[in-house]
Image (cartoon, rainbow, N blue to C red):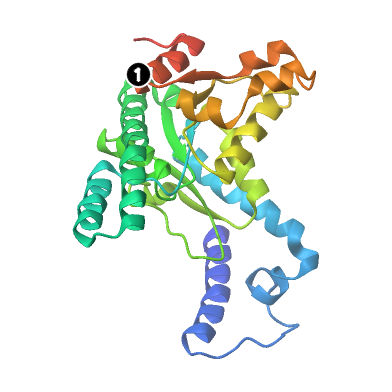
């Protein structure tokens, strides 16, 4: 008998035992005799956190390598923005209700729906051009896997027939991967730090659409890594010039000596999906 078959069977049998306990509604009790890798109570101890971090780093990496994913374009942005169709429906319902607050919210959603549609268009552009490249050079859209801007970018790439990645995160309120993430490339993380490492491990560019705290966190982490040369320089594109310049006055950082004037060259602004793609294409001298 093939030793590898025996090992696989042993592991499968161990996990099947645990699953059978769960299916039967039998609570697991501490069991010193249980195999360590099939012992959830052991793996979830505080002392085994380092092992969980390693596993969370390793699993998505191996899966991406097996599928030939080497280069990604990471898209960040608000999870709260709606598609144009959804926003228009919300507006119609708000107008019919006569609720002033609902109407104000719907009008804001309609205004922000343009960002959803632009992210969708950008995802499609990346996929269309990526499909022309050799397998090892192909570019794939990668997002946080959730709704809003993330969904839009995954959607655009999926509509162009390309695989698309989602790096989701377990949150107190349940969050599911959006339907446009390729199932075999839909990963769920517990640790924000490991998830952010995966965003950067294969990133050849980072495009930040308007968003909230999560988007700001991810944006400034990437800028800091590139500024401190902990990461290879990549195009960092802020999509939505008015939004970003109203939100963060980068010139103040220069005026106060908190950053160098040259640090402003670490990122670029744009309002066009095509221009965003051209920035990336030019940076890597990719074929038109």
Residue 85: x %, y % from top left: 22, 45
Question: For mark 1, does the 10 Å Cα neighbourhood hold few (<14), some (14 to 19), or many (20 or more) residues?
Answer: some
Residue 5: x %, y % from top left: 52, 62
**Residue 71 visible at all:** no
Q: Residue at x 64, y 31 (%)?
A: 222
Give the quarter of the image for residue 141: top left
From the viewer's perspective, tell me whether residue 61 is left or right of residue 66. right
From the viewer's perspective, tell me whether residue 148 is left or right of residue 12. left
The foreground one among 186 and 209 is 209
> Which residue position holds label 1?
274
Q: Residue at x 47, y 39 (%)?
A: 77
Q: Is residue 114 above or below residue 250?
A: below
Q: Secondary structure at mark 1?
A: helix
**Residue 134 visible at all:** yes
Q: Is residue 38 above or below residue 60?
A: below
The foreground one among 32 and 29 is 29
Q: Residue at x 69, y 54 (%)?
A: 53
Assign the C terminus to one quadrant of the image: top left
């Amino acid at each position: 008998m093939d030793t590898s078959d025996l090992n696989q069977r042993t592991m499968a049998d161990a996990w099947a035992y645990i699953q059978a306990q769960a299916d039967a509604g039998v609570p697991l009790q501490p069991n010193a005799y249980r195999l360590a890798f099939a012992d959830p109570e052991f793996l979830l101890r505080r002392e085994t956190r380092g092992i969980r971090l390693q596993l969370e780093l390793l699993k998505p990496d191996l899966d991406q390598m097996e599928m030939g994913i080497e280069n990604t374009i990471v898209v960040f942005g608000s999870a709260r923005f709606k598609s144009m169709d959804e926003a228009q429906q919300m507006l119609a319902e708000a107008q019919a209700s006569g609720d002033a607050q609902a109407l104000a919210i719907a009008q804001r959603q309609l205004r922000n729906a343009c960002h959803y549609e632009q992210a969708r268009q950008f995802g499609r552009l990346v996929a269309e051009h990526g499909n022309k490249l050799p397998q090892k050079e192909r570019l794939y859209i990668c997002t946080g896997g959730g709704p809003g801007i993330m969904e839009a970018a995954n959607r655009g790439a999926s509509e162009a027939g390309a695989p698309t990645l989602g790096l989701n995160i377990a949150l107190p309120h349940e969050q599911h991967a959006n339907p446009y993430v390729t199932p075999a490339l839909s990963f769920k993380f517990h640790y924000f730090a490991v998830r952010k490492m995966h965003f950067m491990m294969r990133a050849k560019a980072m495009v930040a659409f308007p968003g909230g705290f999560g988007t700001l966190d991810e944006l400034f982490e990437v800028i800091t890594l590139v500024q401190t040369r902990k990461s290879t320089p990549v195009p960092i594109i802020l999509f939505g010039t008015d939004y970003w310049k109203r939100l963060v006055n980068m010139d103040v950082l220069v005026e106060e000596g908190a950053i160098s004037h040259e640090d402003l060259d670490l990122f670029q602004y744009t309002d066009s999906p095509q221009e965003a793609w051209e920035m990336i294409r030019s940076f890597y001298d990719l074929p038109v």
